[in-house]
Amino acid sequence: MKRLNAYIDKAFENIPKSEQADQAKEEIIRDLEEKVADLMEEGKSQEDAINKAIVEFGDIDEIKQELDLPDHPSRRKQELARLNLGFSIWGSILVITLSVFINFYYSPHIIWFIYPTFGIAWWPLSMFYNWYRKKVEDQS
């Protein structure tokens, strides 16, 4: 069963060491060993049983999400996207406010601040799209 251990060790190499991750790893190895034993009882060779158990196990991404790891790359990307969205909203509000102040202080008879406002509004809209796309990617 060294091959199963090597497979699971490889799958868990990017996951930070924690008690929760170790428990999940042990449980997965135990389940795979039981699956191999069941397949061998059905008449499969040990090598075939191990291969089939690994193939049926599939991808470990769901398990990584269940562990709710703060350092999980997709979670970190989503947090950065949310931070970018907040920064873009506050930054655009400040720039638009400055434009309004300059407009009414220096040329109150001409309202021109609306024009740069439309251009500045694209910044938070694009960051919202980026954040939403990453959120949808993580859910699928």
Image: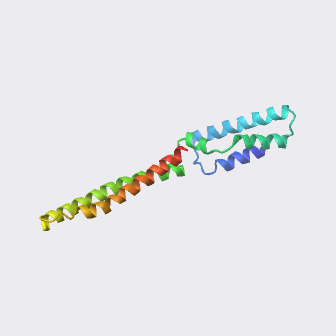
Q: In which quarter of the image is residue 121?
A: bottom left
Report the residue at 13% width, 68% height from top: 106
Q: Residue 138: percent from the left, percent from the top?
A: 52, 46
Q: Quadrant of residue 116?
A: bottom left
Q: In this view, does 134 lie to the left or right of 64?
A: left
What is the x, y in percent for residue 88? 35, 57
Say how the picture is coloured: rainbow
In the rendered image, residue 83, in percent from the top left (x then y), is placed at 40, 53
Q: In which quarter of the image is the N terminus?
A: top right
Quadrant in the picture for the C terminus? top right
| Residue depicted at 79% across the width and 36% down the height | 36
Residue under the point 73% across and 37% down: 32
Q: Can residue 113 be seen in this view?
A: yes
Q: How many labels does the image show?
A: 0
- Give the image location of residue 55, x and y in percent: 74, 43
Residue lying at 71% horizontally and 39% vertically, measured from the top left: 29
As drawn, is 44 to the left or to the right of 81? right
Above or below, comparing residue 10 to residue 107 in the picture: above
Horizontal relation, residue 48 to residue 10: left or right: right
User: Closer to the camera, 127 or 82?
Assistant: 127
Say if 106 sits above or below 78 in the image: below
Residue 80 at least partly seen:
no
